[in-house]
Amino acid sequence: MKSISVFCGSSNGNNSAIVRESYGLGKLLANEHIALVYGGAKVGLMGQVANGALDHQGQVIGVIPDFLRSKEIFHDRITELIVVDSMQERKMKMHELSEGTIALPGGFGTLEELFEMITWAQLGLHTKPIGILNINGYYNKLLEFLDGMVATGLLKQENRDMLLVDTTSEGLLDQMRAYQPTATPKWIKKDQI
């Protein structure tokens, strides 16, 4: 893998392990010569993962909507900053620039981005690996909910299995490298999203 997009919070939260592991993911990507594609901010977990990569000579590409440039405070040390017009364009650009996606802990925005990527995969629009770095069990309740969706027949097990999960960056990266997508017919064309 040559590039991975990372979705995560624009705040640090109050769990030091999450902050530390976010920085560690950036460091790992740099050490593995994998470019980080992320939201472009220098604050919060976004800033932590970017700093982890930058402090270890990694390539970091930020994608930020123009209206968030001041609110999220764009990172001035990154390799490249791409300014787009909308949140939808941001997700599309991050997807185009990466060979896989990782979700770190975050809020509504992180969940929305994660679920859009996994929905695109389910619809057959891409076959890239998508993973959750489940630091300190942050996503345990969400994963239980997804399993409940399978149990009630509203989510197919094969689609649930498309979402990779690990508690370590190294383990998740190994899963992503080994990922074999299920054969999913394309329901819609890319220009229809």
Image (cartoon, rainbow, N blue to C red):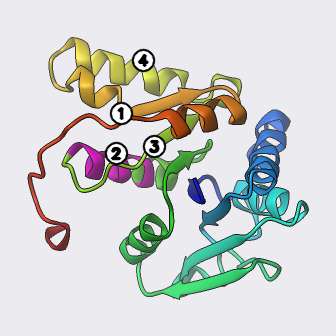
Q: What residue type is labelled 1?
A: Met
Q: Which of marks 4 and 1 is in front?
A: 1
Q: Which of marks 1 and 2 is nearer the N terminus?
A: 2
Residue 11 visible in the picture: no
Q: What residue type is labelled 3?
A: Ile
Q: How far apart are marks 1 and 3 (CA)?
A: 7 Å
Q: Mark 3 points at which residue?
A: 130
Q: Which amino acid does label 4 sit on?
A: Glu
Q: Earlier in the sequence, mark 3 or mark 4?
A: 3
Q: Dots 1 and 2: beta carbons under 8 Å? A: yes
The residue drawn where x is 57% and y is 53% is 1
Q: How far apart are marks 3 and 4 (CA)?
A: 18 Å
* Front in this rendered view, residue 47 or 185: 185
Q: What element carries label 3?
A: strand
Q: Which of marks 1 and 3 is nearer the N terminus?
A: 3
Q: Dots 3 and 4: beta carbons under 8 Å? A: no
In the image, which residues are magenta?
Answer: 113-122
Q: Which of marks 4 and 1 is nearer the N terminus?
A: 4
Question: Would residue 26 be found to the left or right of residue 160 on screen?
Answer: right
Q: How far apart are marks 3 and 2 (CA)?
A: 7 Å
* Front in this rendered view, residue 109 or 185: 185
Q: Is mark 1 on a helix, strand or loop?
A: loop
Q: Name the residue under label 1.
A: 162
